[in-house]
Amino acid sequence: MRKTKEIIGADAWSVLVVDETTGDLVFERADTKKVEKYRVKLGEGIAGWVAQEGIPVIVPDGSVKSSV
């Protein structure tokens, strides 16, 4: 992930997996400990939308609210 981050010039990264019992997305790995406790519903936010739709997206500025 560090190499990928370097190649694409990302400021941050995370890997989410689906919790089979709840259907929520759970942060498996992230470059910060701050997000590891959070869960995301399918369709919720950018990560939830990507997981639901199966369409990758590059977010130029994660601090800006997206309408994806």
Image (cartoon, helix red, strand yellow):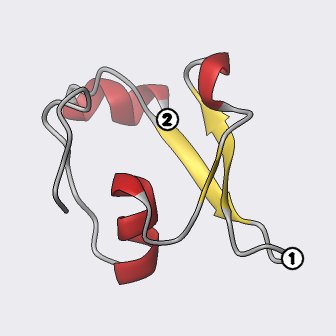
Task: Give the residue at x 20% y 40%.
Answer: 65
Three-letter amino acid code of the residue under disc 1:
Thr
Q: Please, what secondary structure does the residue beneath circle 1 have?
A: loop
| Residue 31 position in % (x across, y down) | 55, 22
Q: Quadrant of the C terminus?
A: bottom left
| Residue 21 position in % (x across, y down) | 86, 76
Q: Quadrant of residue 10?
A: top left
Task: Give the residue at x 35% y 29%.
Answer: 5
Task: Give the residue at x 34% y 55%.
Answer: 46
Task: Give the residue at x 17% y 32%.
Answer: 64
Give the label on residue 21, or none.
1
In-front residue for pair 4/11: 11
Three-letter amino acid code of the residue under disc 2:
Met
Figure check: 50 above or below 2: below
Give the label on residue 1, or none.
2
Is 67 positioned to the left or the right of 55 in the image? left
Figure check: 52 above or below 14: below
As drawn, which residue projects farthest toward the right? 21
Cα distance in 3D space between marks 2 and 1: 27 Å
